[in-house]
């Protein structure tokens, strides 16, 4: 009974944080560092993003850091996403279990684009200059089993966005909890708050302006435009999952997540994962159900886990997500790939 109390006290605290903090803004596109909302891990994406209570691999860093404590092992993984409009998004993470301490990890995510032409009203075809845009997040993770069935995890991360000669910096934490109940093979409850942190404000020499005051040529005034600061995209997730079939050969996991962001409407994610001999995996799901004006929808994926030697495994995963009308015209289908080593 005490374990259940631990879970619900932690989850209630997250709900209060999520609700209070998200009341400041409620519209799409009104938060900074939008790249923090790009999901990572084809396994989770193939399950429709219903992964808060299932996360037990390196992608738990994104979905629920408490899941890093699920196994006394280590894992390193790399994810690459060909995002919309020729944008690349990469994530790399590593985590390892240390006896008596818990699981410690580190991660980095990078969003990048090719250089683009600088265009102005006077030179719509280009000034001959080029600019770049990119995002960066670097962080550390810690997770620990407080009891046999209850775990908690944290991320602390440094966030930076830049465009041409301007940049914005922020700091954030993620907090997650996971509780396992020995029914239906294993029933899991989980909650996670992501991106709880500082506001971000662009600054740099691109907002330095020179105005002429009066009739004389020498009356120049240096002016700096002060831009607004913006909240980070806070996400609060609650999830349940169960292994409804589990034996030596087959496992079927079903999961549901409820998502409450501070810059969009609430939504639900649904997912399934079938595993054969813990070697071959097939996944399916539905992402962002009931989200207003969403372009998301069905997801599918597959994975392979192969033992190299002893307790070292290689993992390859793929997922595809349907983005409806966004896949037409100038936008491409989104494919997710990852490579990993479990040790």
Image (spheres, helix red, strand yellow):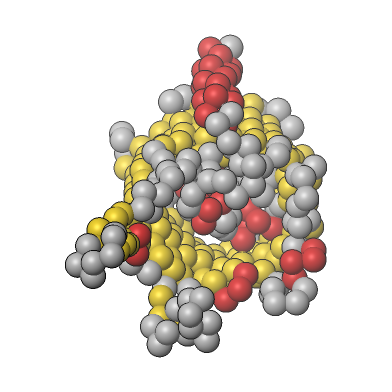
Does residue 203 appear in this view? yes
Residue 189, image x and y in percent?
63, 30
Q: Does residue 1 sit above or below 286 in this rendering? A: above
Residue at image location 45% in from the left, 78% down from the top: 118
Residue 308, image x and y in percent?
48, 69
Please indicate whether residue 8 sits to the left or right of residue 165 in the image: right
Q: Nearer the viewer, residue 123 or 142?
A: 123
Residue 285, image x and y in percent?
76, 53
Q: Farthest residue in the left direction?
A: 218
Q: Nearer the viewer, residue 52 or 161?
A: 161
Does residue 249 appear in this view? no
Residue at image location 57% in from the left, 46% down from the top: 30
Residue at image location 71% in from the left, 37% down from the top: 266
The number of discs equals 0
Residue 156, image x and y in percent?
36, 42
What quarter of the picture does the N terminus occupy?
Answer: top right
Residue at image location 42% in from the left, 73% down from the top: 132
Q: Residue 217's image quarter?
A: bottom left
Q: Does residue 202 sit above or below 150 in this rendering? A: below
What quarter of the picture does the C terminus occupy?
Answer: bottom left
Please indicate whether residue 52 sits to the left or right of residue 133 in the image: right
């Amino acid at each position: 009974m005490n374990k259940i109390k631990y879970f619900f006290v932690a989850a209630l605290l997250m709900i209060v944080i999520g609700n209070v903090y998200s009341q400041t803004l409620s519209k799409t596109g009104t938060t900074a560092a939008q790249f923090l909302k790009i999901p990572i891990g084809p396994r989770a994406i193939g399950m429709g993003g219903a992964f808060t209570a299932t996360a037990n691999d390196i992608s738990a860093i994104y979905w629920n850091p408490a899941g890093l404590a699920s196994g006394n092992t280590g894992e390193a993984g790399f994810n690459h996403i060909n995002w919309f409009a020729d944008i690349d998004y990469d994530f790399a993470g590593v985590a390892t279990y240390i006896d008596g301490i818990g699981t410690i990890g580190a991660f980095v995510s990078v969003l990048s684009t090719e250089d683009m032409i600088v265009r102005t009203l006077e030179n719509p075809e280009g000034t001959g200059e080029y600019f770049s845009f990119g995002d960066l997040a670097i962080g550390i993770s810690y997770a620990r089993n407080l009891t046999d069935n209850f775990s908690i995890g944290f991320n602390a991360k440094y966030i930076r966005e830049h465009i041409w000669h301007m940049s914005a910096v922020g700091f954030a934490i993620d907090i997650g909890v996971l509780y396992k109940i020995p029914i239906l093979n294993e029933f899991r409850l989980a909650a996670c708050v992501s991106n709880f942190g500082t506001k971000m404000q662009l600054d740099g020499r691109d907002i330095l302006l020179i105005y002429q005051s009066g009739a004389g040529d020498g009356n120049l005034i240096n002016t700096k435009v002060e831009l607004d600061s913006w909240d980070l995209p806070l996400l609060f997730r609650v999830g349940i999952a169960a292994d409804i079939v589990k034996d030596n050969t087959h496992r079927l996991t079903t999961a549901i997540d409820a998502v409450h962001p501070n810059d969009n409407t609430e939504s639900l994610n649904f997912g399934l994962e079938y595993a054969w001999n813990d070697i071959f995996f097939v996944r399916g799901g539905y992402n962002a159900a009931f989200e207003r004006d969403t372009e998301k929808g069905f997801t599918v994926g597959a994975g392979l886990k192969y033992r190299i030697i002893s307790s070292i495994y290689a993992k390859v995963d793929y997922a595809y997500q349907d983005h409806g009308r966004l896949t037409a015209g100038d936008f491409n289908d989104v494919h997710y790939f990852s490579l990993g080593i479990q040790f």
